[in-house]
Amino acid sequence: MVASEPAADHTESGDQTESIDQVVDSAEPEPELHGAPVTTSHGIVVAHPHRTALVALVATLRTGGYWQCLDVCAVDYLTHPGRPELPGSVVAERFEIVVSLLNHRQRSRLRIRVQVPESDPSCPSLFAVHPGSEAPEREVYDLFGIVFDGHPDMTRILMPEDWEGHPLRKDYAIGRIPVQFKGAPASR
Amino acid sequence: MQPERTFSTDGFAGLEHNFLTGRLEDLVQWARKRSVMPATFGLACCAIEMMATGGAHYDIARFGMETFRASPRQADLMIVAGRVSQKMAPVLRTIYDQMMEPKWVISMGVCASSGGMFNNYAIVQGVDQIVPVDVYAPGCPPGPETLLHAIFTLHDLIGTGEILKRREDSGAGAGVQVAQLDGQTDTSVTLSAPTMVTKG
Amino acid sequence: MTTTETTTTETTIGDTAALDTTALDLTALDAARDALTNDDSVLRLGELEAEERSGYQPPTDEGTGERMIMNMGPQHPSTHGVLRLVLELDGEIITRSKPVIGYLHTGMEKTGEDLTYVQGCTNVTRMDYASPLFNELAFSLTTEQLLGIEAPERAQWIRMLMCEMNRLSSHLLFMASNGMDLGAVSMMLYGWREREEVLRFFEMVTGLRMNHNYIRPGGVAADLPPGWKDAVRRVLDPLPDRLAEFDILMTGQPIWRERLQGIGVITTEQCLALGTTGPILRSTGYEWDLRRDMPYLRYDEVEFDVCVGTYGDSFDRYAIRLAEIGESIRIVRQILDKMPPGDFRIQDKKVTPPPRARIGESMEALIHHFKIFTEGFKVPTGEAYVAVESPRGELGVYIVSDGSGKPYRMHVRGPSFVNLQTLPHLMKNTLIADTVAVVSSVDPIMGEVDR
């Protein structure tokens, strides 16, 4: 039912019967999806586009059946031992934006992981493609400090507007107070 | 054979003891504790248990408290039911300030009493940092029976009039002073000598 | 007002028919997306700015007349918790609005990084506090996926039983609060009366009325106690009559219909563009239910219908939830017959603590118990996202593990957080009194909105 598409570069676009698995099983040295390298994680395909290619990838996927963007979240890999699962061509940065997409017809999920460097914590916004990403992106900005270019309302959503700092970053302390009866700084 | 009536000599002869007498204070306290009107301040999970206390099984209406007033101007009791976040703290204080005296606060649940299991940047570690609390109800969430016990404790305190004394005089509360500013670093806790209120 | 009917789709066991989306085409989706990104429903105003500018707005050059910016909440009897709505009004009609959240932000995702996987459920369960077992289920399923284990057969069925009972109690809470919000105050008492029976069952099985910490990675915390089948039947048997009472009180009532039909209308394309799931999406006629379409636990072995609406209005959402109570009862009755014997927890020593009796006998058991409850079990490096169908929509948990006993990053995709984005579009050009009906029909739980 998906109508005419810009006859694009790859055969995967628009063809409902061809599944993503065929992309991953292809004989290319590094499997890719519309130009983004691809890995699998516990049965879900994960694409790793560069952040400048994120919006185009999500838009193409949307045309291809991934109509819903369920979630946009971020991870701060500052104290992580290492990410061996990243494809070789991807440069690991401190922050990652993780976008979860859902295809109802094929009943499949797809995840997109975008690397965001600490020196320039910004990423293009998905609002124009999926308006439902407005609130999750605001949450990412609030808790991680990653700014989304093109977002209509880039303000804090969970913390008070005049809060300083981004709580979910790894260099932000949890803010515990020592509890009286332990007699020492609280530790679990 | 009717017993011979004896009349007291203080002027009530002829009235046939049809009057109840007492101190005005006692009557006022009796009336106050029988019709406490809680303000709706349900925040999180404890709110659900607070609503269950108002339900048919636990029926807070037995004690005259089923009218949860939405407007703080009409309420006597603020049951802080749930965790108080950084953003909510000024709102809590505003609502408390809008209530008319006499007013009481029950801190329902461990999150309101002490921050509960959320010892972090986002939750105020005890609502008694913001408003003076009269009764603490522990539990996560406290079942309706615990909340009712807290309410009875409050009623007793209202009945004895102890609650109207200023809190500093009666020495109530744990005396915890916490200067928690931005939640960024572990804040120091200074404790004054704990003074416990014994049930008199 | 036209009669709204809820249609259900028959599902037979093992049915894997794809969702019929032929009616949807990309042009409609694109149109909805463009409308949503450019329309004027959302009042994008900072909170401090809204405070300063609240009150009468002078007429603007673009021709909008005198508007008023008003604040509703966060302390408000009808906003379902601490939700604040900033409304721009033209008389009684809402032109633009903005839900302001964060008043219940608990830092649970940060706390989640500080707790082991065993303790994680105690944290996650308090997010959606009306249906706590679903949070625990999503967390446990994600942890199990990372560990590469699967809970045993009986544990899956127990989880399904508890989750469907929780769906019952959550929808009864919705019935109660929806009724009370719209004026049927006695509904509050009826809804709570039925809910108490379900909570009594939960207390019998898990020990707690709410926030149970029962579904844990590896299975469930304890087996169902003897006599559980009778307890379930005692809960379920009076329900059909009670649901009929609700019908008399609400469904057929002209006042109820006037207040809900045609109020808060949303289309499928708008829902898909906004990432909305759950009863809101189903009220538009789109049958997407993770239990049937991407089954987890043993939902592919029980028979149930997916309830959908027709008009996408608040009445449909109410009717869907009422029908889903019936469906949950149906599922639970099937589980009563199909519950298999077996372990309630996986027998993996690294994950499951040993039974208490063995601790005195075996040194290994003691060490395992100690390690599991102090350090927690170590989960291999990786990332996983698993979603379940909670009473509010798709509840997903995304965990990144660094090989230690605590999640490196735990993110919960709360359905109410995303569903709240529909509010400005639902409330556009409705009256203030309808705000209450709309917010109630969206059924947000602020614990999972703010986390």
Image (tube, rainbow, N blue to C red):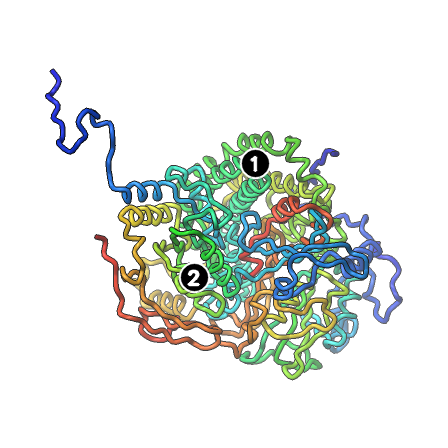
Front position in the image: A71 or A143: A143
Residue position for label 1: C184
Q: Position of residue B136 (x, y in %)?
A: 35, 56
How would you rate the neighbour count of disc 2 (Cα within 10 Å): few for under 14, some for 14-19, many for 20 or more? many
Identified at 63% across, 82% down, the residue is A118
How would you rate the neighbour count of disc 1 (Cα within 10 Å): few for under 14, some for 14-19, many for 20 or more? some
Front position in the image: C359 or C412: C412
Disc on res. C352? 2
Q: Disc 1 marks which amino acid?
A: Ala
Identified at 45% across, 40% down, the residue is B55
For the image shown, how many numbered marks are present on the structure? Answer: 2
Q: Judge depth for marks 2 and 1 and give the one in front.
A: 1
Q: Secondary structure at mark 2?
A: loop
Q: Position of residue A133 (x, y in %)?
A: 69, 63
Left or right placement of residue C132 versus residue C375 in this view: right
Identified at 42% across, 59% down, the residue is B112
Left or right placement of residue A184 versus residue C58 in this view: left
Chain to which mark 1 belongs: C
Identified at 75% across, 49% down, the residue is C267
Q: Earlier in the sequence, mark 2 or mark 1?
A: 1
